[in-house]
Image (cartoon, rainbow, N blue to C red):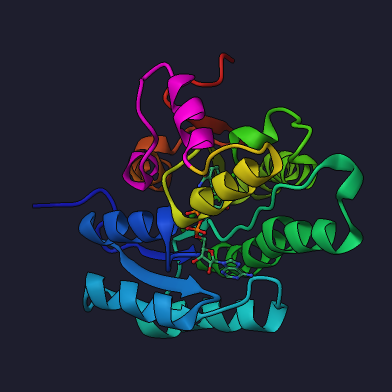
Amino acid sequence: MTGKLDGKVAIVTGAGSGMGRAIAHRYAAEGANVIVADLNADAARSVADEIGESAIPVPVDVRNQSQVQAMVDAAVSAFGGLDILVNNAGVGKIIPFLDTTEADWNFMFDVNCKGLLWCSQAAARVMIDQGRGGKIVNLASQAGRRGEALVLAYCASKACVISMNQSIALALAPHRINVNAIAPGSVDTPFWDEVARQFAHLLNMEIGEPKRTFTKSIPLGRIEQPEDVAGAAVFLASADSDYITQQCLNVDGGNWPG
Ligand SMILES: NC(=O)c1ccc[n+]([C@@H]2O[C@H](COP(=O)([O-])OP(=O)(O)OC[C@H]3O[C@@H](n4cnc5c(N)ncnc54)[C@H](O)[C@@H]3O)[C@@H](O)[C@H]2O)c1
């Protein structure tokens, strides 16, 4: 059976957990060789072990340019090139507007935006030199589509991801490198568990209440799973999306109207 990503080489950042893990699994199932990159070296190793010989774990902090370069070098030396980068590593924190500190702001922008820039630059240089095009998939969020009183810095960082997605797409279009984003809703991962706990604390709710309330507002009527995002990530990394660039695709159960 042939896969949609047969023979391709992919890097997935933040692949030790949640959506990154699900995307790494799907890419390998579609025939790609995958670099499972994560700040948490143990998590990266365990996901690479789950996948098998087509995956290699690489510890990386996406904020650190030399570590990011080493991650890209690892893909080229292990698998002979690079075709796909998924900028999935991300962090978030629920903090009221008036309590947001410089440290909070820097933490979210450093990982979600600066890290995305370093990874995209390092990957694009290899893809341009190879001359065979490429795909970059960025994890944005519904949070980047609107503001929220308790989520200022995270919302702003994901709006920045949507903007960077457009600029990088325009810069790389002449090289046949497609750059697109995915905007999930609230996805059932350790990230959303922690965010829901912080919401419950700030809003004086019982711990499970934010998830229950949010799930009721989703037109498709269930909480989003990491695998719901993996299908879109395969599409945006495959030849099926060769004429699509600069887009941000909502994968959110119909939550966002536009
Ligand atoms: N879960 C949600 O509800 C949701 C919704 C919309 C968008 N997102 C975005 O999707 C992406 C994945 O989220 P998730 O829910 O799977 O999160 P997760 O917390 O389950 O996984 C994120 C992974 O990123 C890694 N990571 C964090 N900082 C890093 C760094 N500096 N360098 C390298 N790796 C780092 C973590 O170790 C972790 O393994 C993030 O960008 C997040 O902002 C999440």
251 left or right, relative to 24: right
Residue 14 in the figure: left or right of residue 238: right
**Quadrant holding ligand 1?**
bottom right
164 versus 215 height, above or below: below
Q: Residue at x 55, y 44 (%)?
A: 196
Q: Which part of the image, by quadrant, shows the C terminus?
A: top right
Q: How many marks?
A: 0
Q: Nearer the viewer, residue 236 or 105?
A: 105
Query: Residue 158 sits in which quadrant?
Result: top right
Q: Position of residue 2 (x, y in %)?
A: 14, 52
User: What residue do we see at 55% from left, 54% from top?
Assistant: 194
Residue 164 higher or lower than 249, as above or below: below
- Residue 100 visible to the viewer: yes
Closest to the observer: 12 or 128? Answer: 12
Q: Quadrant of residue 144?
A: top right
In the image, farthest residue toward the left: 1
Say which residue appears at 76% left-offset and 30% top-offset.
147
Q: Position of residue 5 (x, y in %)?
A: 29, 54
Q: Is there any visible trace of residue 176 in the rendered image?
A: no
> Does residue 214 show up magenta in the picture?
yes
Percent x, y of residue 240: 35, 37
The residue sitting at 60% across, 42% down in the picture is 200
Out of 132 and 52, give the one closest to the viewer.
52
Toward the viewer: 52 or 41?
Answer: 41
Give how far across and how far down residue 80 sits, in percent. 39, 78
Magenta region includes residue 51: no
The residue segment tinted magenta is 208-229
